[in-house]
Amino acid sequence: MHIAWLGKKSPFCGNVTYGREITNHLLERGYQVSFFHFAQQEECDQKWNECPEVFLPFLYKSQIYTIPSPKSSQVLMRSLREFKPDIVHASLTLSPLDFRLPDICRELGIPLVATFHPPFDSKLRNLKSSTQYLTYQLYAPFLANYDQVIVFSEIQKDMLVKLGIPRGTVKIIPNGVDQKKYTPGYGGLKQKFKAKRLFVYQGRIAIEKNVESLLKAWRLANMGDDCKLLIIGDGPLKSSLEPLYNEDLGVIWLGFIGDETKRIETLQSADVFILPSLVEGLSLSLLEAMACGLACIATDAGADGEVLNDGTGVVLDTQGVTGQLKTLLPLFRDQPELVTLLGNKARQRVLDRYTLSNNIAQLEALYRSLCSHTPSLELPTPPNLEARI
């Protein structure tokens, strides 16, 4: 089976990780994959894998959305005609091209699957979550024209069904993490930072991630010299927050860590993972921390509350995060048995529900189901990689 994957390789975000992990595993399982993404040729010197790439022209690209050039639809259609894939899977990049995809694939007779990533707060309790809800309202009429739409939780499915998408069109396939790579182990950062307890946040340093509420709580809790808070990531608020919350308060800014081995080592060194977001989808960073056996604290934004329910972790309300964390942080500092118990439960939850292998198995079944309803396509000889578009 030949899968045309439309996704992201830059700038780094959860969508990038999602596309990298799934396409790599599909290739390992013997599928033919072509990767379509918005990029200039020079951006792609470092490859994830050996699959052919198609570079779609764009005018602007960010972690949040992309503005394609007027020629992008033509490039996409021409490439699909040439490659003749059995199925197109769009890991939606929040661009106007998303709205054109159903017409393009219908004209070419190719089944179309979308993974819909936008974060949300299920209770719509704040301005940011309401803005995200508008994204769902905008996309719903177009998603109804896709053959299948993948979301990560029952909450998302119910939201899209209420907005008019047929229930049978929406398929829940949660994010998954490679439990063989992300596993409990020993990292040496406690010794490096002279800490008995390491707390960690990993994600963008942006308004919707609510990192400042965590930092305020850390300062108010007076955690002592033996505790450190590691901040992994970059974003628009980093430059304003870092001078105010620095090593004098036990806060260590590690920046964006592109090397996966170093990210895993950092998680394995830590005891507690904290995610104070106002809106989320299903956080891969949270799943990675859980797989590494960290005790986890997260808000009930998006599907993260579902992940940590039934005592698997501590779930916060998205309102009053600073006050809640001010109380909880000393508890996690002083109760190592609690940290160990929740870390073990987090790891087991990932093994039970959120492994990447299970995610891929569900995708395979979905692909087979869609392709069984369309005429088989003759696969062309793989294109010459030197003649990429």
Image (cartoon, rainbow, N blue to C red):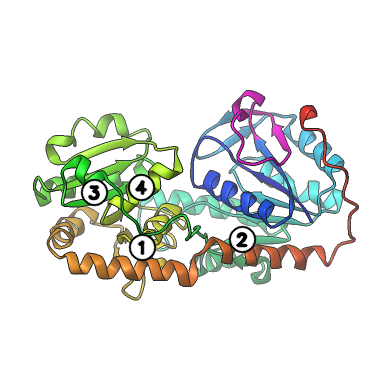
Provide the residue designation for mark 3.
214
Q: Is residue 313 visible?
A: no
Which quadrant of the figure contains the N terminus? bottom right
Question: Does dot 1 land on a helix, a strand or a loop?
Answer: loop
In the image, what residue type sits under mark 4? Answer: Glu
Give the alpha-carbon distance from disc 3 to disc 2, as whole Å: 31 Å
Is tag 3's residue or tag 4's residue first in the polypeptide sequence? 3
Disc 1: CA contacts within 10 A as few (<14), some (14-19) or many (>=20): many
Question: Does dot 3 land on a helix, a strand or a loop?
Answer: helix
Magenta region: 38-59
Is tag 1's residue or tag 3's residue first in the polypeptide sequence? 3
Picture residue at 24% right of the left edge, 55% below the top: 321
Provide the residue designation for mark 2.
150
Is tag 4's residue or tag 1's residue first in the polypeptide sequence? 4
Give the alpha-carbon distance from disc 1 to disc 2, as whole Å: 21 Å
The front one of 230 and 372 is 230
Disc nearest the viewer among 4 and 1 = 4
Q: Relative to 83, does residue 291 appear above or below in the rendering?
A: below
Disc 3: CA contacts within 10 A as few (<14), some (14-19) or many (>=20): many
Give the alpha-carbon distance from disc 1 to disc 3, as whole Å: 15 Å
Q: Is residue 45 left or right of residue 31?
A: left
Assess whether residue 39 is covered by the magenta stretch.
yes
State the image quarter where residue 274 is shown.
bottom left
From the top left corner, tell me how far across and down residue 240 is, in percent. 26, 30
Provide the residue designation for mark 4.
265
